[in-house]
Image (tube, rainbow, N blue to C red):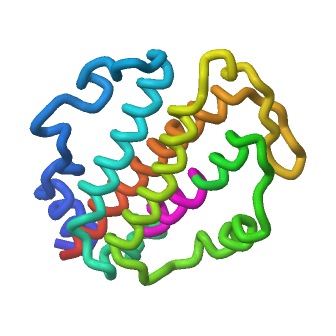
Amino acid sequence: MDNKSQSEAKLKQQPEAPESLSETQPEPWMRGIVPGLHPVIGHLLRAAQQIREDANATLSHLSTNELWSTFRQVTSAGFHARHLAGSTDRLCSYLESRQLTAEQLAALTTEGISGNESAAALLAEIDTAFNRYEAQIRALTPEQFGEVREIGRKRYKTTAISVAIHIVEHGQRHIGGMIAAARLARSAR
């Protein structure tokens, strides 16, 4: 059997990822209405919860080597985790009606470089970013949904609710990439 066939066979043997709380209880969006919050705000909080759970389930069992390994030029799970934390932090600045700081811009330039952080360190970065996001979402009122926010150096105009929704949409995109990369890394075991 050639290497490609061996890799594909290993992938088929892997359990479906991630192994999350969603396997023992419903996904966060089906866990009930968040009491005392506007339904849109509640759903955004549930989406953030899903991202946290999937990131933890996906990364927590990977070695540092597996976390940063690439397979056939597929981006590493570590990159997706680092970018998820960094992009969430940057988008939260826009949600706050602020532009990026010099520190955020500097971090952006190194985000794509392969690292050596552990899964625990990356999960802590994701938690920090999503703690910030969730605090902003809890403070957001329906009256503020349509407030204008400016994105990037070109200051593209959008609304506060659009930024808030995009943060979790973008997060789910990188969770998908993270799961695929982790599965490939585990297949090399």
- Frontmost residue, 101 versus 165: 101
The magenta region covers 78-88
Corner quadrant of residue 23? top left
Residue 111, given in percent of the width and then of the height, sits at 60, 70
Above or below, 24 against 161 in this view is below
Q: Which quadrant of the figure contains the C terminus? A: bottom left
Q: Is residue 182 toward the left or the right of residue 130 in the image?
A: left
Answer with the quarter of the image where residue 166 lies.
top right
Residue 25, image x and y in percent? 14, 33
- In x, y percent, where is residue 40? 49, 19
Q: Quadrant of the N terminus?
A: bottom left
* Residue 119 position within the rendered picture, expressed as x and y whole percent measured from the top left: 33, 71
| Residue 64 belongs to magenta span | no
In the image, taking residue 139 as reference, residue 56 lies left or right, namely left
Identify the residue shown where x is 30% and y is 63%: 59
User: What residue sits 70% from the left and 42% below the top?
Assistant: 96
* Identity of the residue drawn at 65% across and 47% down: 91
Q: As displayed, is residue 63 above or below residue 89?
A: below
Tally the marks: 0
Residue 79 on the magenta segment = yes
Name the dominant secondary structure of the magenta segment.
helix
